[in-house]
């Protein structure tokens, strides 16, 4: 069965589209990556998403929902063209859309469950492509008392578990998240949760420091020039999120625009030394958050290797800081996955759409905290 997965991540860098061939059942699956395509957002599209995330009004949200549907359909059509695959051969498109807000359930808030909102109209994708679309994956898990995240672990086990190896898959997108995969032959439960910030704060800081010239800290150059502010680092590490045990999830609501506005108050683009110090501190913060999480919950279970993926894997300063935090466990790069590392999340939503078509649950309750396994997503016919 051929299925396409679409992902627009919290880093707001573009749409990833992956075409997978899947056979069997989730407990005994065979798969191959047929094609992958990444479509970067231009400045206009990125600014449109950012404005909605940071200052969303009902009108902005409504417009972006339709626009993202068009962009996701465009990515699907371009992928099929590049792969020379006919639309009629595709069983479904699994579209995550773009998360504009995520509220995890918080004990003591009165209402036990949280809420989440992903934009990208599935009806538009179905209409433009003629292919059925599975979307809105997170809400069923949240309705069952879960965090609605992380959802990638279900696919990680199918795609990346290996006999005799305990692998920690650490994604550093806008937010950092880890999946600890037991050996393939084991029936041990998965461990998966958000470690804390990923690239979100670093990207925002680099953009502000450069007056909009940079979208990220290229090669970690800004962090390398700066000095870590130990007092600020300790203040950042006092965030209540880090006291939560798994299952836990977070987002830009906590580690994004509002926090960056607070940290950079009074700084101007020309204050190079001050910006470099802030970016060095945020790099250390991102790595320390990961390291503390590993020391508390990952390494006590045993781990043979950590595989780093996402945009953060391209930042040498961050990679070095993470390597120091997870030592003596070896840190491998994304090539260890055996698949284009940028395709990981898009491939995961292809797998989740496949599971939906089979009527198989796609959440991992021990990772999300849901009351039990649930079939995820809603189908919009093509």
Image (tube, rainbow, N blue to C red):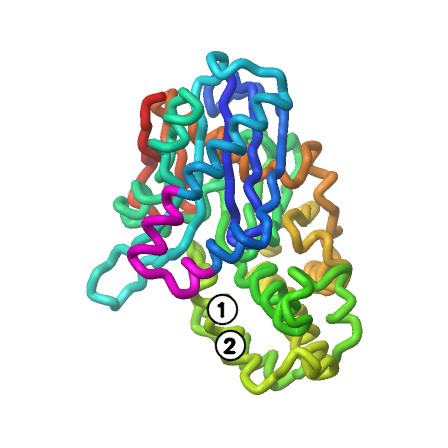
Pick out the residue farthest to the front: 44
Q: Which mark is residue 257?
A: 1
**Which residue corresponds to the image point at 51% horizontal and 76% vertical from the top-left?**
261
Is any atom of residue 288 visible in this view?
no
For residue 199, side relative to residue 322 (left or right): left
**Which residue corresponds to the image point at 41% horizontal and 45% vertical from the top-left?**
366
Q: Nearer the viewer, residue 122 or 304?
A: 122
Q: Main secondary structure of the magenta part?
A: helix
Question: In the image, which residues are magenta?
Answer: 51-66
Q: Are marks 1 and 2 in contact (CB under 8 Å)?
A: yes
**SS class of the residue under badge 2?**
helix
Q: Quadrant of residue 204?
A: bottom right
For residue 71, side relative to residue 276 (left or right): left
**Which residue corresponds to the image point at 66% horizontal and 34% vertical from the top-left?**
164
In what quadrant of the picture does the C terminus appear? top left
Is residue 167 within the magenta segment? no
Q: Nearer the viewer, residue 161 or 207?
A: 207
**Which residue corresponds to the image point at 38% horizontal and 56% vertical from the top-left?**
102
In the rendered image of this protein, does residue 376 appear above or below residue 259?
Answer: above
**SS class of the residue under badge 1?**
helix
């Amino acid at each position: 069965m051929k299925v396409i997965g679409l992902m627009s991540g919290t880093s707001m860098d573009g749409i990833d589209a992956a075409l997978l061939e899947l056979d069997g059942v989730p407990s005994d699956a065979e798969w191959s990556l047929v094609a992958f395509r990444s479509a970067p957002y231009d400045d206009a599209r990125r600014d449109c998403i950012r404005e909605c995330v940071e200052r969303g009004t009902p009108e902005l949200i409504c417009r972006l929902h339709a626009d993202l549907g068009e962009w996701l359909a465009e990515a699907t059509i371009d992928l099929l063209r590049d792969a020379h695959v006919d639309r009629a051969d595709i069983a479904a498109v699994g579209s995550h859309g773009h998360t504009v807000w995520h509220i995890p359930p918080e004990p003591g808030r009165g209402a036990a469950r949280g809420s989440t909102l992903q934009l990208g109209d599935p009806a538009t994708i179905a209409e433009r492509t003629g292919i059925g679309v599975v979307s809105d994956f997170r809400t069923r898990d949240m309705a069952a008392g879960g965090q609605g995240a992380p959802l990638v672990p279900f696919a990680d086990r199918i795609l990346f578990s290996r006999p005799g190896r305990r692998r920690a898959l650490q994604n550093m997108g806008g937010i950092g998240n880890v999946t600890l995969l037991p050996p393939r032959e084991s029936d041990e439960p998965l461990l998966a949760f958000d470690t804390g910030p990923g690239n979100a704060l670093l990207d925002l800081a680099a953009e502000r420091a450069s007056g909009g010239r940079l979208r990220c800290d290229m090669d970690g150059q800004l962090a390398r020039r700066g000095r870590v502010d130990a007092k600020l680092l300790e203040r950042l590490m006092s965030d209540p999120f880090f006291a939560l045990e798994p299952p836990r999830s977070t987002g830009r609501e906590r580690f994004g625009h509002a926090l960056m506005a607070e940290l950079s108050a009074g700084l101007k683009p020309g204050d190079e030394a001050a910006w470099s110090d802030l970016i060095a501190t945020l790099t250390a913060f991102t790595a320390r958050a990961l390291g503390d999480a590993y020391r508390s919950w990952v390494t006590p279970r045993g781990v043979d290797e950590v595989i780093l993926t996402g945009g953060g894997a391209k930042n040498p300063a961050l990679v070095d800081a993470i390597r120091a935090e997870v030592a003596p466990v070896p840190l491998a790069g994304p090539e260890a996955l055996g698949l284009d590392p940028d395709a990981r999340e898009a491939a995961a939503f292809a797998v989740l759409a496949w599971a939906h078509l089979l009527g198989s649950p796609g959440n991992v309750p021990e990772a999300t905290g849901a009351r039990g396994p649930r079939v995820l997503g809603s189908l919009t016919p093509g």
